[in-house]
Amino acid sequence: METVIVYIDDAAYARQQLASVLDADAARTPLPPVHWVLVACAPRMTHRISKWVSHSARENWRAKWSDKLFNEVSPWLRQRGDRITEVLAKGPLVELQAQLAAEHRTQHLLDARRPKMGHDMQPVMAPAEAPADAPAGTKPPPWSLPGAIAGVFGLALVLAE
């Protein structure tokens, strides 16, 4: 059974994204059952909210929010005969992704979070690093050309005085 990790924060948007993926795959071949690992990414709360709401109240709100989200998405996937595992993200997504990928032995990932205007979304995967045996032209130089030129001209001005 294939395992897919899906990051969601909005039920309608996630169902739309999943439907497009399932329709594209179903057009090629009939789909076997899939094990979906649904990861709920609750909205971030400002640090000022801690004045008014206790930590346990915030955790309770996150749990209720994720239950509501899962109740809107999970039955739709279970109709296909798929298996669902529900996870609430509580820390950095990069670390959670590494843990889930190791636990479920999969690299299949779908980021179905709704993009928000003016807000940078937390990355799910760590940026890829250049391999050590990469050609010399692929690594950035340790110095910047404009900075080196400015330094040479600064040195020339100091020596001219």
Image: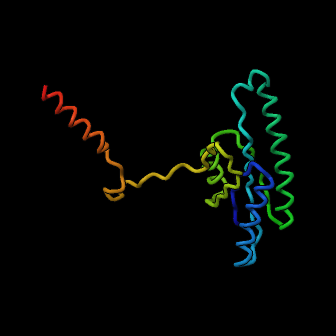
**In the rendering, at what x and y percent does residue 43 appear?**
73, 40
At x 32%, y 47%, the residue is: 141
Percent position of residue 53, x then y:
79, 25
Report whether residue 1 is seen.
no
Q: Quadrant of the N terminus?
A: bottom right
| Residue at 74 percent of width and 59 percent of height | 36
Q: Observer-nearest residue: 117 or 70?
A: 117
> Residue placed at 66% from the left, 39% from the top?
91
Q: Position of residue 96 (x, y in %)?
A: 64, 46
In the picture, which quadrant includes the C terminus?
Answer: top left
Is 101 on the left or on the right of 73, as rendered?
left
Q: Is residue 60 above or below residue 121?
A: above
* Image spot of residue 56 (x, y percent): 80, 28
Q: Quadrant of residue 149?
A: top left
Query: Who is closer to the viewer here, 10 or 147?
Result: 147
Q: Is residue 97 visible?
A: yes
